[in-house]
Amino acid sequence: SKKKAAEAMDVAVEGTTVMLGHGHVRCGEELAMLLLESCATDGAMVDAKSVGRVDEILGTWPREKVDEHALKMDALPTHVDGALKVIHAAIRWIEKAEKEQVDAVDVEDVAAKWHHWIATFLCETVGTALMAEATPHYARARAPEEFAHALLEVAKKGDKEQVDVVGVRGILEMLVVNQCDDAEQMRIKFVEGLEDPSLMETQLGLFGKFSITAIKRKSKELFRMLCQKYDQDIKRDKGVKNLCNRIVQAHFGGGDNPMGMLGGLMKAMMS
């Protein structure tokens, strides 16, 4: 019955928080994953109570800091690895829930809250070492100022010639998920936070700025023209190029190359 299922979930949450409180992170992770997998499999109702259960687990999760220089990407600390697994499972559960399984809860708000939780968790525990993992979460977290601050920390540790790449990558990640207004706010805060704002006044920096306008207008043609115009600048970084392709797939359908197709069209018109 639903009552027994709810009681079982409460027991699982209590067990998870007790395990985490005693430092048994792997055991806590396993219990949390069982709970979330059960929610997904059984089609558990996404309501204030079920969301609160997940929040309780996240609130108990250990946030021990790790030396990012000693971090091994293929062997993450247990509390970091477990947090990633649990948050991904939680977000998958609510985002796949059918409309009839949602009661008085804004799924997008909850997802944004959990994306924000894991993004800040990663930055607090491992610094910028897992920024590649944190960035897609920040892009969905509705926290543009915090995202800008995190990217500034990355920029400070790299070469000046790569500052615009850091900023534009962040912008494009947000455009993939259609967070245009947040992308503009993040861009402004990122530029304001630079000791030398001119580092974003590059051709690639302009591409990032104008891309916000193109996606905000839902203009496939404008975005492709930008990709064509700034083709050589985009090619400076493989990640930027990949994000351009993801934007095309997300907003305009298809996996075509935004640079190549327009170039082919121009050649055809001129022949």
Image (cartoon, grey):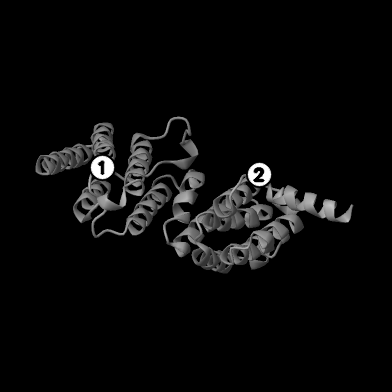
Residue at 71% over, 60% down: 226
Is residue 39 positioned above or below 159 on the image?
above
User: How far separated are the C-alphas under marks 1 and 2?
Assistant: 40 Å
Mark 2: which secondary structure? Answer: helix
Instruction: Pinpoint residue 146: horizontal percent, then vertical percent.
Output: 45, 61
Q: Which mark is residue 43?
A: 1
Instruction: Pinpoint residue 114: horizontal percent, then vertical percent.
Output: 35, 52
Residue type, label 2: Lys
Q: Which residue is mark 2?
A: 238
Q: Which mark is residue 166?
A: none
Between 223 and 163, the one lying in front of the other is 223
Q: Does residue 199 appear anywhere in the picture?
A: no
Is residue 41 positioned above or below 232 on the image?
above
Instruction: Pinpoint residue 133: horizontal percent, then vertical percent.
Output: 48, 44
Q: Does residue 161 appear anywhere in the picture?
A: yes
Is residue 3 positioned above or below 154 on the image?
above
Residue at 61% over, 57% down: 168
Task: For label 1, count other residues whose C-alpha is less than 10 Å away and answer few (under 14), some (14-19) or many (20+).
Answer: some
